[in-house]
Image (cartoon, grey):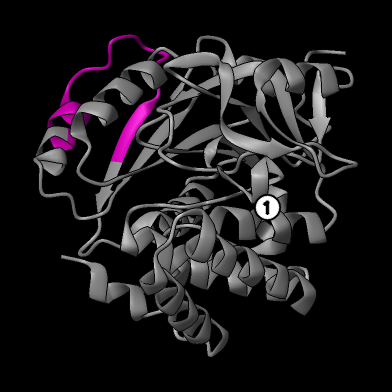
Amino acid sequence: MPPSRPPRVVAVVVTWNRRALLERLLDALDATPGLAEVLVVDNASTDGTHEWLAQRAAAPRARASAPVLRHRRLSSNTGGAGGFDVGLRWAMERDAELAWLMDDDGVPQPGCLATLLAHHGALDFWGPAVVAEQAPDRLCFPIRLPGGSRVVHALADVERAAEDGLVRDVVIPFNGVLVTRDLVERIGSVRAEFFIWGDDVEYLWRARAAGARIATVVAARFHHPATDDLGTPMMGGRTTYNHSPSDLKHFCMARNNTVNLRAYGGWAHVLAFWVKTVWFYSLTRRHRGRIRLSARAAYEGLRGDFTGHRRFLA
């Protein structure tokens, strides 16, 4: 039998005022074999990103097989959630069989896409190991291994947990993940109203609820700048809390996490999250104002009001 045709892979990149990082990422994508197009969704950047993208898209491609660059500037900043909603729908319009989703600050390492594509047909929603670019032996985002409550930060722990090179039912969404057209048609696009934080988790949990085959491909690597305070230890190191110094990020996290847990876990999970929130800002890192802010965010989310984050936008 003749070999099957390679799938049409379209990368979706969401950017906002990080032109230097975007340039680095697009250089990496230009050098990635097997990529048909790169769609950049610009969240109304004000740092010259739009003009630079126009120049780059009009320039001759470095090689004939390099992906075609297309870009779209939104009229306002819709956050990562809004950007990925636009980009994923756009990729489907561009006849993508696989959408490869990523923010502007990450970089797929050489061979990342090829390693992921080796599992095409066996998985629906899968991605690489996302490691801190400053320390590639550590995960950028700590993960909970399947079958237990253990949260790990070291890449070696993930490698030991893998079976046939995969950690099943675990993936870090929107950091070099592939999603099939079939899955998008079944579960829809990203919840744009989330703005930031939790939109990726909601999409993962929605995919899981739909029976999607999900996995991390440990041999594939995606570098990402190390995050600040993500997974801050609390309760004597027995668990962690996703603290951020940004009120905008925290508001969206408290709102969206409450909504996600209510929809996919139930009230017991919501209560556990709130116990952690009160504990963290009462004992671990005292900030009573954050407790009030968290309560307001959760209340608005449970009411279906996703406009409150706008008060934190410049």
> Which residue, given by chain and number where applicable, does mark 1 sit on?
204
Nearer the observer, 34 or 252: 252
Q: Is residue 227 left or right of residue 265?
A: left
Residue 87 drawn at (x, y percent): 43, 51
Q: Nearer the viewer, residue 211 or 165?
A: 165
Q: Quadrant location of the C terminus?
A: bottom left
Picture quadrant of residue 2: top right
Q: Residue furthest bottom?
A: 303
| Magenta run includes residue 201 | no
Instruction: Report the residue at 25% width, 25% height from top.
Output: 23
**Left or right relative to 72: residue 64:** right
Rendering coords of residue 296 (x, y %): 44, 83
Q: Residue at coordinates 41% horizontally, 58% vertically from top-left? A: 86
- Magenta stretch: give its range: 53-70
Residue 203: give x, y in percent of width and height.
63, 57
Is 208 placed above or below 231 here? Answer: below
Whole-percent x and y of residue 88?
50, 52
Q: Quadrant of residue 185?
A: bottom right
* Relative vertical location of residue 200 with respect to residue 292 in this rendering, above or below: above
Q: Quadrant of the N terminus?
A: top right
Is residue 257 at all visible to an observer of this figure?
yes
Mark 1 residue type? Leu
